[in-house]
């Protein structure tokens, strides 16, 4: 009887060991394999709490259906510190925005490098346009915001301009470029982030907080921008 019990124990250890080896997934250099701890669905994104080699962290990925314990793979990400999600009404100390999330192993980190660069490149200005917008009596012009950026940092201002570029749903917000025909030291394009929607060609009035030297990581930085802005007129609420 003791021998039988011993054989059962040995067999169990062999099976357990085999299962453990099966979970040890080999990945290509530069590729991450993470295990899902929890998930939160939001418009355009799924927020994932994951573990990797004993570390636990959050990431945001294009909407995906996942289960707790599922293994996911990615190779390219952009870290955001103190990221405030208006949708979740929550601030993350650190979160990774991942573009190439996959349920199957990724062969190489180089496969998605170009697509990631393309996705983030679209938030930049498309160039100066011939625009002439009457300034607000109770606001600032684009030129004034750039010229007075140090004094205005952290303050809420209003500005009126024409939407020259619009990219919705990137990093849980809409990215709006406005121009009003003014410029300061060659700076003529103001980036505005908002949860309100608009469209290219509209003349809108926005109110937001001035941020300077904003660095989103991966080489994407802005000298001046308006964050958490509301479209006072000319747009449409989401």
Image (cartoon, rainbow, N blue to C red):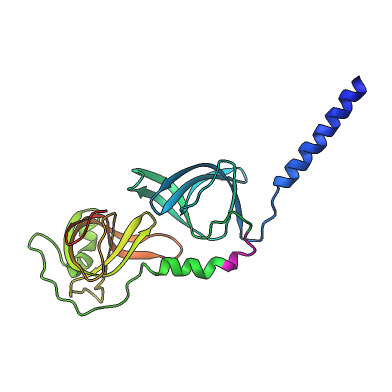
Q: Quadrant of residue 130?
A: bottom left
**Number of marks drawn:** 0
Does the magenta run of residues contain 95?
Answer: no
Which one is in front, 45 or 159? Answer: 45
Which span is picked out in magenta? 106-111
Residue 74 vertical position relative to residue 84 in the rendered view, above or below: below
- Residue at 37% x, 54% y: name it: 172
Does the magenta run of residues contain 107?
Answer: yes
Quarter the N terminus occupies: top right
Residue 170 vertical position relative to residue 95 in the rendered view, above or below: below
- Residue at 49% x, 51% y: name it: 64
Q: Position of residue 11 (x, y in %)?
A: 84, 33
- Residue at 42% x, 54% y: name it: 80
- Residue at 56% x, 41% y: name it: 68
Q: Position of residue 105 (x, y in %)?
A: 64, 57
Q: Position of residue 10 (x, y in %)?
A: 85, 32
Which one is in front, 185 or 164? Answer: 164
Residue 128 vertical position relative to residue 8 in the rendered view, above or below: below
Name the outermost residue toward the top: 1
Residue 205 vertical position relative to residue 81 in the rendered view, above or below: below
Left or right side of 177 for 76: right
Name the outermost residue toward the bottom: 130
């Amino acid at each position: 009887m003791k021998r039988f019990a011993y054989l059962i124990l040995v067999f169990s250890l062999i099976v357990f060991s085999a299962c453990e080896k099966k979970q040890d997934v080999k990945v290509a250099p530069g590729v991450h394999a993470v295990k899902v701890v929890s998930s939160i669905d939001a418009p355009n994104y799924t927020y994932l709490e994951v573990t990797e080699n004993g570390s636990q962290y959050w990431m945001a990925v294009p909407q995906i259906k996942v289960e707790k314990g599922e293994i996911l793979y990615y190779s390219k990400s952009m870290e955001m510190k103190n990221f405030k999600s208006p949708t979740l009404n929550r601030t993350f100390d650190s979160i990774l925005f991942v573009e190439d999330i996959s349920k199957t192993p990724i062969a190489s980190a180089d496969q998605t490098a170009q697509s990631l660069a393309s996705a983030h490149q679209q938030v930049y200005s498309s160039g100066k346009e011939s625009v002439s917008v009457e300034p607000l009596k109770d606001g600032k012009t684009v030129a004034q915001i750039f010229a007075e950026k140090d004094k205005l940092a952290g303050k809420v201002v209003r500005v009126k301009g024409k939407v020259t570029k619009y990219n919705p749903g990137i990093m849980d917000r809409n990215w709006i470029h406005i121009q009003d025909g003014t410029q300061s030291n060659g700076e003529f394009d103001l980036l505005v982030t908002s949860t309100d929607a608009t469209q290219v060609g509209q003349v809108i009035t926005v109110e937001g907080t001035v941020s300077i030297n904003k660095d989103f990581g991966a080489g994407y930085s802005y000298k001046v921008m308006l964050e958490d802005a509301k479209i006072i007129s000319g747009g449409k609420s989401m």
